[in-house]
């Protein structure tokens, strides 16, 4: 069984984040025990589109992959080329193309967010800049010419001018075109340009033609305004704050690890299984229950042996309720690329701390890799989630995990992470 390399969750992510752009996230007080926080991806938010369901006679299904354009479906947007201004590695998992305008205030707000993301994900993110000066901005074309003129002296200077124009946008946006040219000359002096060369290059008709062609190309596509983003070739209309874009990056990185087939049978029917969650603070030992939840235990063991859980954060921890992990992206939206049905054993109850169960995407048939461990008895969950194990050692480590509730928003404490999961198979 090989991990898939194609994207299955980008469109779903974009849909969710597009909805979030018009929503406010609830910030309720921690509910009493009778109102246990939701174990869906993020409390109070939409799930990842229609939850995959099993087909008759099937216990596991592969999440449908995003269709790729065929010969009769060419992309409206040209591929990244030498004519683009690019920061980051060519083999990055995520490429963000930004159609921009130097006079656009929203571009100026987005620019430091993108710069911070590139600094945080230098191996995973590539940024591509394309001119799209808007007609209503009287100095947008001149500003673009200035950046291109600077690049003729040294291509790296394009980015220096870009950063300066955005950082000081409020200084020049209200100037006349003549005053703006004087302002530009001062900036070029501070940036150690050859002023005579810059003045000559600024008047180069070929640079003006390049910018006008880029503008015409954007108009032909129908780009409505700036900043306009493509993420791995798809238009992105969701929130543009750091946290939301970081979520998309982490989910797209995860796609390189997702599977295109359901797991094979890996359990020995004669064996007993334990899972050891190795944490920096010690080990959490879980007795697995293959006789009660064979599908869940089989899939958990398969993923663990293939390193899926290594480095996973406990991304949601609500003291007195549960700790949730199993998503390498740490977003609460990630999964292994397949889902499978619930296995409800009426003899297994959420009657104590340390019960280990699968979380899902709002449907009883949408289990994947995420699981939670109770920190208290939660009888209101009985019959709702697949219980597949219980903690037999290290409960004190779970109880000491830092509180984190992404649904509340705001700054979160760094998540405790699983170093690795070790599966111990014991024969009678």
Image: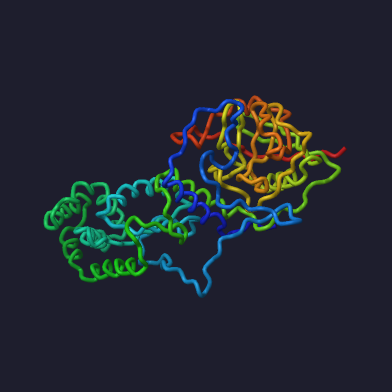
Q: Is residue 153 visible?
A: no
Which of the 4 image quadrants contains residue 419? top right
Residue at x-position 26% and y-position 55%? 102
Decide: is 232 above or below 410.
Answer: below
Residue at x-position 34% and y-position 70%? 220
Which of the 4 image quadrants contains residue 290? top right
For residue 217, side relative to residue 301 (left or right) = left
Question: Horizontal and vertical percent for residue 55?
Answer: 71, 56
Q: For the N terminus, which image quadrant?
A: bottom right
Q: Is residue 380 visible?
A: yes
Residue lying at the far bottom in this picture: please name it: 72
Looking at the picture, tell me which residue is in the foreground, 57 or 302: 57
Question: Horizontal and vertical percent for residue 179?
Answer: 12, 54
Decide: is 106 above or below 378.
Answer: below
Q: Total marks drawn?
A: 0
For residue 355, side relative to residue 246 (left or right) = right
Decide: is 213 above or below 11.
Answer: below
For residue 128, side relative to residue 256 (left or right) = left
Question: Horizontal and vertical percent for residue 295?
Answer: 75, 46
Q: For the C terminus, which image quadrant?
A: top right
Looking at the picture, tell me which residue is in the foreground, 333 or 348: 348
Looking at the picture, tell me which residue is in the foreground, 244 or 210: 244
Question: Horizontal and vertical percent for residue 224?
Answer: 34, 60
Residue at x-position 26% and y-position 63%? 152
Colour mapping used in the image: rainbow
């Amino acid at each position: 069984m090989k991990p898939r390399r194609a994207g299955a969750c980008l469109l779903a992510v974009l849909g969710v984040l597009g909805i979030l752009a018009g929503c406010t996230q609830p910030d309720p007080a921690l509910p009493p025990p009778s109102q246990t926080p939701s174990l869906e991806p993020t409390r109070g938010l939409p799930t990842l589109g229609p939850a995959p369901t099993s087909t008759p006679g099937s216990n596991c299904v592969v999440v449908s992959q995003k269709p790729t354009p065929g010969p009769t479906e060419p992309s409206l947007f040209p591929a990244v080329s030498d004519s683009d201004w690019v920061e980051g590695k060519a083999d990055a998992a995520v490429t963000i193309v930004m159609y921009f305008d130097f006079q656009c205030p929203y571009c100026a707000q987005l620019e430091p967010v993108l710069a911070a993301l590139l600094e945080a994900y230098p191996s995973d993110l590539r940024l591509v800049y394309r001119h799209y000066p808007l007609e209503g901005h009287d100095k947008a074309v001149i500003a673009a010419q200035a950046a291109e003129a600077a690049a003729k002296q040294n291509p790296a200077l394009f980015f220096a001018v870009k950063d300066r124009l955005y950082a000081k946008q409020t200084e020049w946006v209200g100037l006349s075109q003549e005053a703006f040219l004087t302002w530009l000359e001062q900036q070029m002096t501070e940036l150690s340009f050859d002023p005579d060369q810059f003045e000559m290059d600024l008047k180069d008709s070929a640079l003006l033609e390049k910018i006008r062609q880029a503008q015409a190309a954007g108009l032909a596509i129908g780009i409505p305004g700036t900043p306009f983003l493509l993420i791995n070739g798809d238009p992105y209309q969701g929130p543009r704050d750091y946290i939301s874009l970081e979520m998309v990056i982490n989910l797209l990185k995860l796609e390189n690890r997702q599977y295109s087939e359901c797991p094979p049978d890996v359990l020995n029917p004669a064996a007993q299984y334990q899972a050891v969650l190795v944490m920096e603070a010690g080990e959490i030992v879980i007795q697995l229950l293959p006789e009660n939840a064979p599908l869940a235990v089989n899939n958990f063991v398969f993923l663990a042996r293939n390193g899926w859980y290594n480095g996973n954060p406990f991304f949601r921890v609500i003291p007195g309720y549960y700790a949730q992990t199993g998503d390498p992206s740490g977003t609460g939206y990630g999964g292994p690329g397949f889902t499978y049905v619930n296995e409800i054993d009426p003899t297994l109850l959420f009657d104590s701390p340390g019960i280990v169960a699968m979380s899902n995407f709002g449907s009883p048939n949408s289990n994947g890799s995420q699981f939670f461990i109770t920190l208290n008895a939660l009888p209101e969950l009985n019959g709702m989630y697949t219980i597949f194990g219980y903690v037999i050692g290290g409960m004190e480590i779970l109880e000491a995990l830092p509180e984190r509730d992404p649904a509340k928003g705001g700054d979160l404490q760094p998540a405790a992470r699983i170093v690795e999961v070790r599966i111990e198979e014991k024969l009678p």
